[in-house]
Image (spheres, helix red, strand yellow):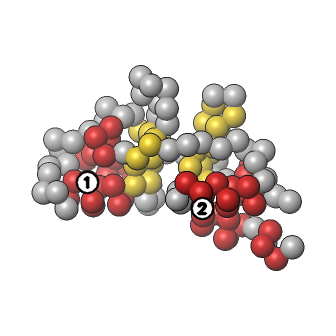
C-alpha cells in the first residue's frame, strides 16, 4: 500500500497569514497553481488559501483584494503525516470534506497532497 510520501507534491509554495490577498493571487498566478499553504501564524496552525477562497470570500462579497489579508480568507486545515497510507488519506479527506492538506513531519512542512494526487498517482482502489 502506498504512503502519502509517495504521492505528495514536495515543492510547496507558502505564504504568510499577514500577506495581502493580492500577493496570494500573484503567487498563484506566477506559479500556475490554485492554492497556497499558509505558514503557521501565532496559533502555530497551518492553513490553506485557494482560488475559491478568493472568489467566494472577496470577489463575491464585493470586497477589495488589497484590503484583505490571507488570514481573513484562508481555510483552517488539519495536516497529515507522510507515513499515512493513501487509503487512510482518502478516508481523512472524506471525513473532513477536504480536497488538499499539508504534509507535516516533526513540525516541518514536507509537502502537500490532494485528491488529485490520489487519482493521478495511485492504483490502491484496484487492489
Q: Residue 81 carries which label?
A: none
Residue 42 against residue 49 in the figure, above or below? above
Left or right of 71? Residue 117 is right
Q: What element carries label 1?
A: helix
Residue 28: x and y, percent?
39, 54
Residue 77: x and y, percent?
50, 44
Q: Nearer the viewer, residue 19 or 43?
A: 43
Residue 125: x and y, percent?
78, 73
Q: Which of marks 1 and 2 is nearer the N terminus?
A: 1
- Asked where in the image residue 29 lies, by quadrant, the reply is bottom left
Left or right of 28? Residue 61 is left
- From mark 1 to mark 2, how far is it between C-alphas? 23 Å
Q: Which residue is drawn at 41% across and 22% down?
A: 42
**Which residue in the structure is indicated by mark 1?**
57
- Residue placed farthest to the bottom in the image? 126
Residue 108: x and y, percent?
63, 31
Which of discs 1 and 2 lies nearer the camera? The answer is 2
- Asked where in the image residue 115 lies, by quadrant, the reply is bottom right
**Which residue in the structure is indicated by mark 2?**
94
Left or right of 9? Residue 64 is left
Q: Residues within 10 Å of mark 2 (few under 14, many from 20)?
A: few
Q: Which residue is drawn at 31% across and 32% down?
A: 18
Contact between labelled residues 2 and 1, with CB atoms less than 8 Å apart: no
Q: Is mark 2 on a helix, strand or loop?
A: helix
Q: Which residue is drawn at 27% across and 61% down?
A: 55
Q: How crowded is mark 1: few (under 14 residues within 10 Å), some or many (20 or more)?
A: some
Amino acid at each position: 500500500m502506498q504512503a502519502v510520501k509517495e504521492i505528495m507534491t514536495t515543492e510547496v509554495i507558502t505564504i504568510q497569514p499577514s500577506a495581502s490577498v493580492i500577493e496570494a493571487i500573484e503567487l498563484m498566478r506566477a506559479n500556475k497553481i490554485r492554492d497556497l499553504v499558509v505558514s503557521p501564524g501565532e496559533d502555530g496552525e497551518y492553513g490553506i488559501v485557494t482560488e475559491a477562497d478568493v472568489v467566494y470570500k472577496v470577489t463575491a462579497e464585493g470586497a477589495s483584494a488589497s484590503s484583505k489579508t490571507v488570514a481573513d480568507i484562508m481555510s483552517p486545515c488539519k495536516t497529515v503525516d507522510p507515513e499515512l497510507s493513501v487509503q487512510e488519506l482518502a478516508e481523512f479527506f472524506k471525513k473532513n470534506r477536504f480536497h488538499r492538506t499539508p504534509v507535516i513531519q516533526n513540525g516541518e512542512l514536507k509537502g502537500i497532497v490532494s485528491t488529485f494526487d490520489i487519482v493521478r498517482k495511485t492504483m490502491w482502489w484496484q487492489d
